[in-house]
Amino acid sequence: QVQLVESGGGSVQAGGSLRLSCGTSGDNFNIYCVGWFRQAPGKEREGVALIDVNRGTAYQDSVKGRFSISQDKSKKTFDLQMNSLKPEDTAMYYCAADLKHPYCPSWSRDNFDYWGQGTQVTVSS
């Protein structure tokens, strides 16, 4: 069992930055793949960034060059640094962990068996 708790959301103006953090507890030593997802009202939940602790990172095209996902082993967190934020980045952001695989097989939400409760990000123009 793993528990995930997101923090760091808030309201910013376009062009601003936020840093989201996904705190982990429980059997977190088995986490090899973490994803940050977001869901805007009326839209499907979509993957934003993935981190495979052994293979690297991946990003959705719309956030490449602006967002960065990283692992902080000392704090046991997986963080999402978001720069140059745009109004279209407004959404509830969730972190998720895949404990079924020792790597990130794909962006599919079905691979992720543990989810946090989400943190709201609002970007105003």
Image (tube, helix red, strand yellow):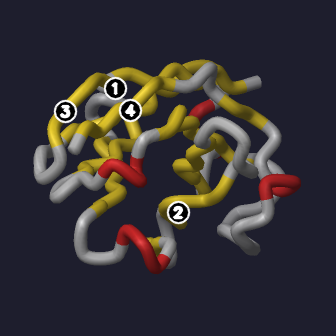
Left or right, residue 36 beside residue 27: left
Q: Are marks 3 and 4 in contact (CB under 8 Å)?
A: yes
Q: Which residue is mark 1?
A: 9
The residue at the point 75 percent across, 73 percent down is 105
Q: Pointer 3: residues within 10 angstroms few (<14), some, or many (20+)?
A: some
Quarter of the figure with the N terminus: top right
Q: CA distance from mark 3 to mark 4?
A: 8 Å
Question: x, y (%) of residue 119?
Answer: 47, 24
Earlier sequence position, callout 3 versus callout 2: 3
Earlier sequence position, callout 1 versus callout 4: 1
The residue at the point 12 percent across, 53 percent down is 15
Q: Pointer 4: residues within 10 angstroms few (<14), some, or many (20+)?
A: many
Q: Which residue is mark 4?
A: 121
Left or right, residue 26 beside residue 11: right
26 versus 93 height, above or below: above
The tag on residue 50 is 2
8 versus 102 height, above or below: above
Question: What residue type is disc 1 on?
Answer: Gly
Q: CA distance from mark 2 to mark 4?
A: 18 Å
SS for callout 2: strand
Residues 65 and 125: in front is: 125
Question: What residue type is disc 3 on?
Answer: Val
Q: Which residue is mark 3?
A: 12
Say which quarter of the image contains residue 94. top right
Of badges 1 and 3, the one in the foreground is 3
Of badges 3 and 2, the one in the foreground is 3
Q: Are marks 1 and 3 in contact (CB under 8 Å)?
A: no
SS for callout 3: strand
Quarter of the figure with the C terminus: top left
Question: What residue type is disc 4 on?
Answer: Val
